[in-house]
Amino acid sequence: MKLKHVVSATQFDTDTLRKLFNTASKIKNGNYPKKALNGKIMAAIFYEPSTRTRLSFEAAMQRLGGQVISTENASQFSSASKGETLEDTVRIISSYADVIVLRHFSPGASDIASKFSSVPVINAGDGNGEHPTQALLDLFTIFGKFSKNGSLPPKFTVAMVGDLTNGRTIHSLSYLLSLYPKVKIIFVSPKALTAPNSLTSHLREKNIDFLETEDFKYALKVADVVYQTRIQKERFKGKKDYKKYFGSFILDNKTISLMKRNAAIMHPLPRVNEINPEIDDDKRSIYFEQAQNGLYIRMALLLFLFDKA
């Protein structure tokens, strides 16, 4: 599959994922063309804060020989502060760069940008919509720990925990997991923060077994992967609503005692209080390895977009 833009996890198929993961594995082992993107420029345009996504994309481009131009807070430090539309911004930036990495506060912003850009656009998170490259690194991490012969074990169960309404990483990872029919997903959240209907409808269409529950302990007992997420303060209009759900589900030494010995604990980061640092050294806690994998996946993705893989 030829990728021109990366705006949604729904663009991917299993064959493309296999090729991408094979390339990322080689990169992780230090085998990659260090000058493949010489002369190429990446524009990193972030309207929302970012640490891992922005820096790993910039490091990925530079490790492959390319260069980076960026703005960390485009809402304030770009012409958006003067009222310029996203469409006009993208039209101009695409004449300066060879690829645009865009984070925006509006769902669907990257899809809109792709229609006005003359170069590839990569969605680095669009509000409470999607975060496809995070999902790619998440699935790459899962495959690295659990895959046998390029597939996941039968009855493989992933528990998605936290703010599932606003959790764009949850949305994108679920779309990728729906490509594997033997996977079961358990959505654990307060009733007011359940997965959006668009996502659950997609899972039904794909005949993916999923359960929606508030029973955190049950999910911990049966899951092979616990994908923990934070309650997202920036998505709530008032502090009262945020405090109502803050601390709903916490992983610590007590709660992880319910989990399988060979399970994995993942988190897209940053964490607040939902993962106690006391479990960082538990062998099941792989969220820092997961974050490191973001570099390798994003390097692989850039090579694919430029037909260098």
Image (cartoon, rainbow, N blue to C red):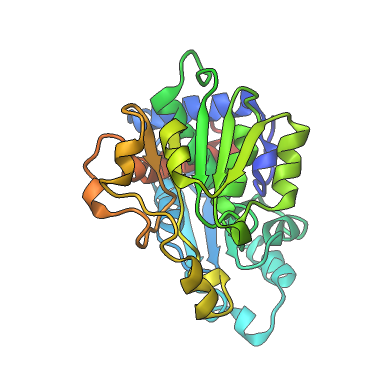
Residue ranking furthest to the top: 149
Q: Nearer the viewer, residue 105 or 302?
A: 105
Q: Answer left or right for 168 relative to 51.
A: right
Q: Nearer the viewer, residue 50 or 254?
A: 254
**Callout count:** 0
The residue located at (24%, 39%) in the rendering is: 282
Residue 252 x, y percent position in the rendering: 29, 49
Examine the rendering and report whether any part of residue 307 can be seen: no
When the figure is inspected, residue 283 is found, relative to residue 192, above or below; the finding is: above
The residue located at (60%, 33%) in the rendering is: 177
Q: Nearer the viewer, residue 185 or 269?
A: 185
Q: Answer left or right for 289 relative to 106.
A: left
Residue 16 x, y percent position in the rendering: 62, 28
Residue 210 x, y percent position in the rendering: 63, 36
The residue located at (61%, 84%) in the rendering is: 81
Q: Answer left or right for 11 relative to 151.
A: right
When the figure is inspected, residue 277 is found, relative to residue 178, above or below; the finding is: below
The residue located at (26%, 34%) in the rendering is: 283
Examine the rendering and report whether any part of residue 88 can be seen: yes
Please state, as top left, top right, bottom left or bottom right, where the N terminus lies in the image. top right
Residue 68 x, y percent position in the rendering: 47, 58
